Image: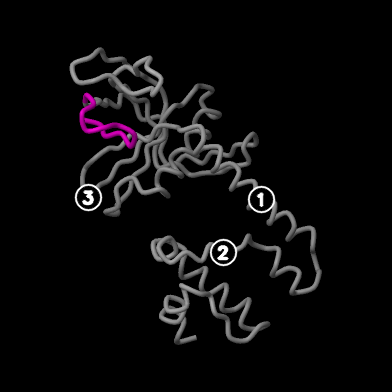
Amino acid sequence: MLSDTRSRSDDTQSLLAISDLLDVEENIWSPTYGLKGKIDATVHSIISQPKVSSNPLGRRSQKGSDMETITGAVPFEIKTGRSLAGIEHRAQTMLYTLLVAERYHQQVDAGLLYYTQKEEVVRVPVVRNELRALIMARNDLAGYMRRRHQLGEGSVNDIEESVLPPSIDDERVCKKCFVVDTCMLYRRVSFFSSFGNLVIGPLTSEFDSKLHRL
């Protein structure tokens, strides 16, 4: 059985079969998209799923309706955490579909996430607008990195302001971020040395709790 991040409770359940293991921990670099990734596994999958109806909403067929079979190479990411198909997992998997598509010269419409604790496989379909937003974020970050190299031996303040994009400073998002400790430490080293006490609004308590020993 296969879960889908965009399916509804009344949709017919999709079925998954993996017919071949193409590679393990495959390093793929894509000059086209400027991306590099190490995919846990690349597999040849056979997915039987409800046909997408032709109605304006593009919803899948209801239970008992016709099925279609999709085959091809897909990224297969293994996750050990409890969070099921979180945004960071879906984003990573969608970007990996670009790498697999370029590496194997075929269209890849989805990737697979396997959660070991729940023993569940989740299909992550490629959503055009979401993928476009991810590529735009990648280009934005690449622009800051390029500026860092262009600055070279410029002033310290100029370099600090240009190395990374502005932080989000959203309490809900930042508490769940896997690099929050690194981010807080970077800000502690970069900004306290130049500006003294730094107050960062809703994250002040989080900042103090993580860095009070420094």
Any magenta on residue 8?
A: yes
User: What residue is disc 3 on?
Assistant: 117
Judging depth in this view, the residue of 39 and 171 nearest the camera is 171
Residue positioned most to the left: 64
Residue at the spot 56% in from the left edge and 64% down from the top edge: 167
The 10 Å Cα crowd at callout 3, few under 14, some 14 to 19, many 20 or more, is few
Residue at the spot 27% in from the left edge and 15% down from the top edge: 67
The 10 Å Cα crowd at callout 2, few under 14, some 14 to 19, many 20 or more, is few
Residue 128, position as x, y percentages in the image: 50, 32
Q: In the image, what residue type sits under mark 3?
A: Gln
Number of the front mark, 3 or 2: 2
User: What residue is disc 2 on?
Assistant: 167
Residue 182, position as x, y percentages in the image: 50, 69
Q: Tag 2 or tag 3, which sits nearer the N-term?
A: 3
Does residue 174 appear left or right of residue 6 in this picture?
Answer: right
* Disc number placed over residue 142 in the picture, else none: 1
Does residue 152 appear left or right of residue 124 in this picture?
Answer: right
Any magenta on residue 145?
A: no
Residue 173's place in the image compared with 43, above or below, is below
Q: In the image, what residue type sits under mark 1?
A: Ala
Does residue 90 appear left or right of residue 65 in this picture?
Answer: right
Residue at the spot 73% in from the left edge and 54% down from the top edge: 146
Residue 129, position as x, y percentages in the image: 51, 35
For the magenta stretch, what is the residue range?
1-12
Q: Tag 1 or tag 2, which sits nearer the N-term?
A: 1
